Amino acid sequence: RLFDSIINLRDVGGFYITSGKKHFRVKTGMIYRSGTPATGSARDIAILIRGLGIRTMIDLRSKKDYLKGENKSPYRTRVPKHVIHTAPFLGLEFVVRGVVGPAPVRDKVKSFQKLVTLKGTTAAKSALLCHVNAKGLFGMYTMFLDHCKAQICKILEIFTLETNYPIHYFCNAGKDRTGIISGLLLSILHVDKESIVDDYHLSENEGVKKGAQRDAMESNLQKSGLSEDFMNAPKEAMAQTLWYLTKKYGSVHGYLDHIGFSDSKKRMVLDILLEKVE
């Protein structure tokens, strides 16, 4: 393995696109996705910064996701501060409108009862997340897309500046928030849906079934109140998500227009990341 302890890291390039009689390829060595580098060794960080030449890291995690002792990790001590763009994916709108708002009244009552009886915020959160468990990965992804629009647009705008490349973006496992950004980014590049789904599914085959890392993920899931089903990356979760965007917004590009990621911004990304193939 190239990396000691960063999971699910891969180049997002290499896809081929045909437009009429013209053929294109997504450049390699430009965009990388992974789980958090906060678990990485000093060697891992050296490979990212010096080996891959990463100029921009997009941290999709919220502050609650940060690992204990992370400030002393090589990720925090050896990566230049100007390289890291902190772009929390899950804001107040996601919590209020995505999680709390649609929750059944009984779950809201249970959550409130656990708070007032001093059983703790973790127990209260678990009661509130029952309906998220019921919706599954697909349901959670639609919540991301519908209630994190401003954050998603801001994240994608980082990809419009050539001086930001090579770019590395990540969340905890490099699967869910990272998977959504990858799906949108590849859609901008006109990569076919089957390839987007297959790329997402790689997170299950290569990223989330590795001993200690999987144990850590299971522990985090238990703390968050989500079920073990959220450990996986089944093809149908991404396929349904792309279908949802088409059903609700007309297409993935319709969704991007809706959140403010205009055609001119898409063209900037295309000009940077696509190369002609003869």
Image (tube, helix red, strand yellow):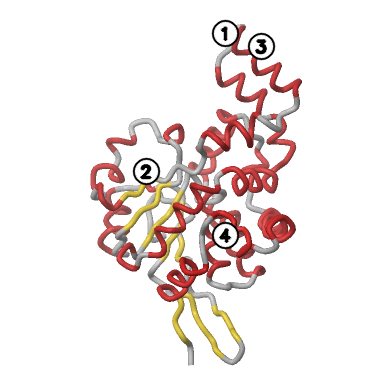
Q: Secondary structure at mark 3?
A: helix
Q: Position of residue 142 (x, y in %)?
A: 66, 47
Judged by depth in the image, the label closer to the viewer, 3 or 4, is: 4
Residue 274: x and y, percent? 46, 77
Q: Nearer the viewer, mark 4 or mark 2?
A: 4
Q: Earlier in the sequence, mark 1 or mark 2?
A: 2
Instruction: State the CA–CA distance, disc 3 to disc 4.
Output: 40 Å
Residue identifier under label 3: 113
Residue 81 or residue 212, whichever sits in front:
81
Marks 1/2: CA–CA distance:
33 Å
Q: Does 105 sit left or right of 86 as displayed?
A: right
Q: Secondary structure at mark 4?
A: helix
Q: Which residue is mark 2?
A: 38
> Which badge, 4 or 1, is on the more N-terminal residue?
1
The Cα atoms of the two marked residues, 4 and 2, are separated by: 30 Å
Residue 171, image x and y in percent? Answer: 47, 46
Q: Are marks 3 and 1 in contact (CB under 8 Å)?
A: no
Q: For the residue labelled by badge 2, is the local secondary structure a helix, a strand or a loop?
A: helix
| Precedes in sequence: disc 3 or disc 2 | 2
From the image, state whether disc 1 or disc 2 is nearer to you: 1
Indicate left or right for 258 with 62 as reference.
Answer: right
Residue positioned 53% across, 71% down in the render: 189
**Nearer the observer, disc 3 or disc 2?**
3
Residue 248 x/y as whole percent: 72, 55
Q: At 61% across and 19% down in the image, what residue appears?
A: 123
